[in-house]
Image (cartoon, coloured by chain):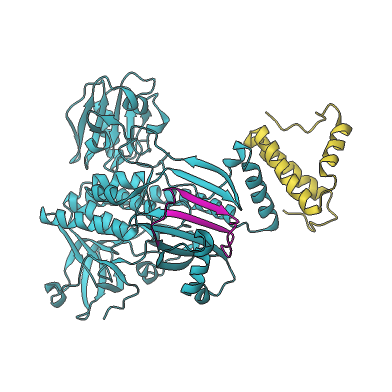
Amino acid sequence: MVQARYDIAFRLYPYERVAAQSQPPRRHPVVIVGGGPVGLAAALDLGRRGTPVLLLDDHEGAGKGSRAICFARRTLEIADRLGAVAPMREKGVVWNIGKVFYGEDRLFEFDLSPEPGHRHPAFINLQQPYFEKFLMEEIRAAQARGAPLEIRGCNAVTALTDRGDHVHLEIGTPDGPYALEAEWLIACDGARSPVREGLGLSFDGRVFEDNFLIADVRMTADFPTERWFWFEPPFEGAGQSALLHRQPDDVWRLDFQLGWDIDRKAELDPAAVRRRVDGMLGQGAEYDLIWTSIYTFQCRRMERFRRGRVLFAGDSAHQVSPFGARGANSGVQDAENLAWKLDLVVRGLAPETLLDSYCAEREHGADENILNSTRATDFLTPKSEISAVFRNAVLDLARDHPFARAMVNSGRLSVPCVYDGMPLNGPDALDGPAVSRVGAPCPDAPVGDGFLLGRLGDGFTLLTFDVDAPAHVEEGGVVARRLAFEAPTGALRERYLGQAERAVYLIRPDQHVAARWAHCDEAAIRRALRAATGAEPWI
Amino acid sequence: MDLILTPNLPDPDGFYDDLLAAHEGLSAEESHALNARLVLILANHVGDRAVLRAALRAARDGGETNAGGSGGAAAP
């Protein structure tokens, strides 16, 4: 018996009885719990690398409701490497302009657009169920190509025990329980993570005493494709702030900040929701309410994202407020950080301690996201009289003075973090641009009729600019494949050479810079490869 | 740059007049809001986090040594 906790938007992995349910427990190299954006991305990444993965989900597909709607450039770049980005780009809505209002007044607008020379835009808006569906379609395609991926829907983890060299899992299904074993378990089972709770691990942080109402409405309206955010909205019953944001399929996300002391049930009554929506859109606006939800949020994280043979990724490990689009986006970065490391460990090409660098790097990422998210929340919901005075002073000044606009915080939108000073880093021995320093995600740039990131592939890359180097450098079974450019121009030169004349970059499989030099020294490259795979620190 | 805590205004009495004049006729709430805007404008003009941190410390310490009023026990 598996309890359904929500309705399904797309039935992506219907329950099927498998032989394992009537056999003694079988051991799997990697088991992933949770088929949301993070679990699916991790599964696809590992499966493409040839490491067998079993993904378990207690439902049969993507849950209803738009939920995460803003997918950032880094997420699109990851989806691109995974082969799943085309339908996302086709379906997603691209937006660049944000407008900020204070009461009746339009304070200012900002433009995210496009520093030129990137394959993907800063953001697309796309309902989360589509994101999951497109990842799942690519998983099916990878399976058809022979990737060792298996997804079992309606398989709920009911108990787990870490037995040192594996994790023992009890699974509930519509046909009754069975057991299996995982050498490694990735918990991508959300903010209320049953795996985390099952292991009795804490999840500490700050609770924000505020409720937000989401109303997704479908309408054909001529609002522009922009993000509109109101502080103290002038329409009736809108609460302290409100947001209007476009999604695909003529759906608009409306978000109202209701305060702490509310009657949730009364607020979710469709008539009450409609009164609010009418207030924002104007009387007589025609629309269908397609999803409503009230959420509160916390900013918190686990102390460590690894516990023995269990690794936590996405909301199970860290939770942030939605302002800034840092939930799903950071979770997908977790998945990509973990996938190549776990692949090397499972193959015996890297020591188990490589996984501790996953913790160091992604805990750092979570801290950065929590910091940004907490600051945005403090601005949106002033916690004291004086913080309200300063908040309103900033908004009053923002009308006329650019300096104050920089302080207006309705969410600092997600950008990937840089792994400055992290244990896998090799030397930064190039007087090169900061944007591509060691630890940074590789900035994209046009090359030929394509883009740089599309040329990097799934493994380590030795990226050279006007430098002779071997076609492959191999160390301990890990290979870095050379990608050479002669006389680079434009964005490629600007982002990788700056004032330097030549350069050698060692790029990790997750497209972060592992080390860089002004010349090619094969011994140093080997040492940096050892450092980047956790075999031996550089220092 | 260090925070200047020695006399630096050419005409301190004149500035004090200007400050009070700016608050003339405002309610306590409006004055509160004006002060907040003023702090933000001046902070942006200074533009140096170290100086601003030193100023915040000096302002807090000033409140503690003069105690008496609203604060009660000084913060540790």
Where residue B27 appears, as percent x and y from the top left, is: 81, 52
Where residue A268 appears, as percent x and y from the top left, is: 48, 73
Q: Give the image quarter of residue B37.
A: top right
On-image quarter of the N terminus of chain A: bottom left
**Magenta span of residues:** A218-245
For residue A95, side relative to residue A145 (left or right): right
For residue B44, side relative to residue A207 (left or right): right
Q: Is residue B34 above or below residue A466?
A: below
Identity of the residue drawn at 75% across and 45% down: B35
What shade does chain B have? yellow
Where residue A98 appears, as percent x and y from the top left, is: 48, 45
On-image quarter of the C terminus of chain A: top left
Q: Give the camera-side residue of A302 and A135.
A: A135
In this view of the protein, can residue B70 be seen by the observer?
Answer: yes
Secondary structure mostly seen in the magenta stretch: loop
Identity of the residue drawn at 68% across and 41% down: B40
Task: Count the numbered circles shown.
Answer: 0
Q: Is residue A219 magenta?
A: yes
Q: Is residue A108 above or below residue A470?
A: below
Q: Is residue B53 magenta?
A: no
Q: Which residue lies most toward the right here? A: B13
Q: Is residue A265 above or below residue A225?
A: below
Q: Is residue A155 above or below residue A41?
A: below
Identity of the residue drawn at 39% across and 47% down: A361
Tell me the cyan chain: A
In this view of the protein, can residue A312 be seen by the observer?
Answer: no
Q: Which residue lies most toward the front here? A: A284
Where residue B48 appears, as percent x and y from the top left, is: 64, 33
Q: Give the camera-side residue of A1 and A414.
A: A414
